[in-house]
Image (tube, rainbow, N blue to C red):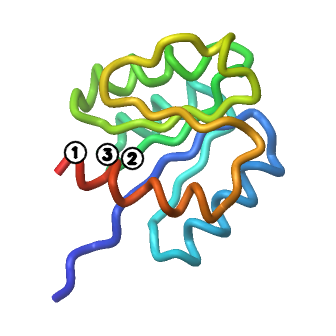
């Protein structure tokens, strides 16, 4: 039996972005879960491990870095990708976290995902 496809959690407070990411990543063969806020993302993380976290930086409640820290409390080696329209605001990324600027092309996103998942394996 082939291995299960990698699980990706996408966190963004914009429904349109969640929809596009979920569609593209699913078509690319990933199992995708989405959350529109940090609290729901942590709940999903408590339900089981993910192979990659993709998160927006600026969101109400918890920002992307806070989401990463909360989920890494459950899964210390979780690789993460922060996507933000404002790299200066996002600041320095924690270890093992990549950064892409919005707007991000799906081609660029799909290019970077395998290296992030491999890096964690």
Q: Secondary structure at mark 3?
A: loop
- 120 w.r.t. 92: above or below: below
Q: Looking at the image, which residue is at 45% across and 41% down? A: 53
Q: Which residue does the numbered mark 1 point to in the structure image? A: 120
In percent of width and height, residue 102 lies at: 74, 39
Please report whichever mark, 1 or 2, sits nearer to the chain's N-terminal start.
2
Q: Looking at the image, which residue is at 80% across and 46% down? A: 15
- 92 w.r.t. 3: above or below: above
Q: Secondary structure at mark 2?
A: strand
Please report whichever mark, 3 or 1, sits nearer to the chain's N-terminal start.
3
Residues 102 and 10: in front is: 102
In percent of width and height, residue 26 lies at: 56, 71
3 vs 1, front mark: 1
Question: Taking 4 as reference, is 98 left or right?
Answer: right
Q: Quadrant of residue 101?
A: top right
Task: Determine whether label 1 and label 2 are within 8 Å by CB.
Answer: yes
Q: CA distance from mark 3 to mark 1?
A: 16 Å
At label 1, counting other C-alpha atoms closer than 10 Å, the crowd grade (few under 14, some 14-19, many 20 or more) is few
Q: Which residue does the numbered mark 2 point to in the structure image? A: 52
């Amino acid at each position: 039996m082939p291995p299960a496809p990698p699980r990706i959690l996408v966190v963004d407070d914009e429904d349109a972005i969640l929809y596009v990411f979920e569609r593209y990543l699913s078509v690319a063969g990933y199992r995708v879960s989405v959350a529109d806020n940090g609290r729901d993302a942590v709940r999903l993380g408590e339900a089981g491990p993910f192979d990659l976290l993709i998160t927006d930086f600026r969101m109400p409640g918890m920002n992307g870095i806070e989401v990463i820290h909360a989920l890494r409390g459950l899964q210390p080696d979780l690789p993460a990708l922060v996507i933000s329209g404002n790299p200066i605001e996002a600041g320095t990324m924690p270890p093992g976290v990549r950064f892409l600027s919005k707007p991000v092309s799906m081609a660029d996103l799909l290019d970077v995902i395998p290296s992030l998942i491999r890096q964690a394996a």
